[in-house]
């Protein structure tokens, strides 16, 4: 029998981890979507998550498909279903595929530049602002509060 790994007709089949323990156990999730625009902006998402103890970073499928995030960080119908106490959606449009994975979060805060973004229909707090403006301002405010 020929070695299947060398056969040009061989297709590798792997089971994708549906839910990472970090996402499953996190009481706070900061999630990124295509609205972050550039891979470098994931640094802002990670900085925001670092403000909260035990927060995890997740994201939408497009970011995982772009290899900006690992698939174990994907939230949605083809990723993890999460139920954190607080879900911060950053630059997420609100596609049904993503909503199905996070709709049972306790409190949802969404930041998006589009005031008509579908994610706002599922959010407790809607912030219409560019992430590059909002996150640094939020971080600065948190720092001032810690120093007071």
Image (cartoon, rainbow, N blue to C red):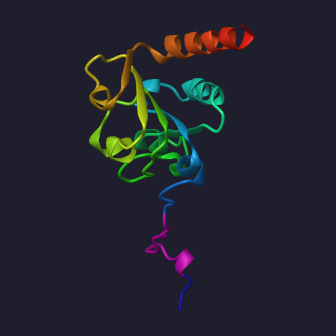
Queried whether the magenta region covers residue 113, the answer comes back as: no
Q: Is residue 120 above or below residue 132?
A: below
Q: Quadrant of the C terminus?
A: top right
Which residue appears at 35% of the width and 51% of the height? 77
110, 93: nearer the viewer: 110
- Residues in magenta? 4-15
59, 9: nearer the viewer: 59
Q: Is residue 33 above or below residue 114?
A: below
Queried whether the magenta region covers residue 11, the answer comes back as: yes
* Left or right for 90, reference 25: left
Which residue appears at 29% of the width and 16% of the height? 115
Residue 82 appears at what percent x and percent y? 45, 47
Q: Quadrant of residue 68?
A: top right
125, 59: nearer the viewer: 125
Which residue appears at 29% of the width and 38% of the height? 95
Residue 15 appears at what percent x and percent y? 49, 67
Q: Is residue 26 above or below residue 10?
A: above
Residue 29 appears at what percent x and percent y? 52, 37
84, 136: nearer the viewer: 84
Instruction: Decide whether the magenta segment is chiefly helix, strand or loop.
Output: loop
């Amino acid at each position: 029998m020929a070695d299947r790994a060398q056969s040009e007709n061989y297709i590798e089949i792997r089971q994708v981890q549906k839910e990472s323990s970090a996402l499953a156990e996190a009481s706070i999730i900061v999630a990124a979507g295509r609205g972050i625009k550039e891979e470098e902006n994931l640094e802002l998402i990670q900085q925001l998550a670092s403000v909260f103890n035990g927060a995890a970073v997740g994201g939408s499928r497009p970011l995982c498909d772009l290899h900006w995030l690992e698939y174990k960080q994907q939230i949605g119908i083809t990723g993890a279903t999460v139920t954190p106490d607080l879900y911060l959606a950053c630059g997420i449009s609100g596609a049904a595929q993503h909503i199905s994975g996070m709709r049972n979060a306790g409190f949802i805060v969404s930041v998006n530049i589009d005031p008509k973004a579908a994610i706002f229909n599922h959010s407790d707090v809607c912030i219409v602002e560019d992430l590059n403006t909002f996150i640094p301002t939020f971080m600065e405010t948190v720092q001032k509060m810690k120093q007071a």
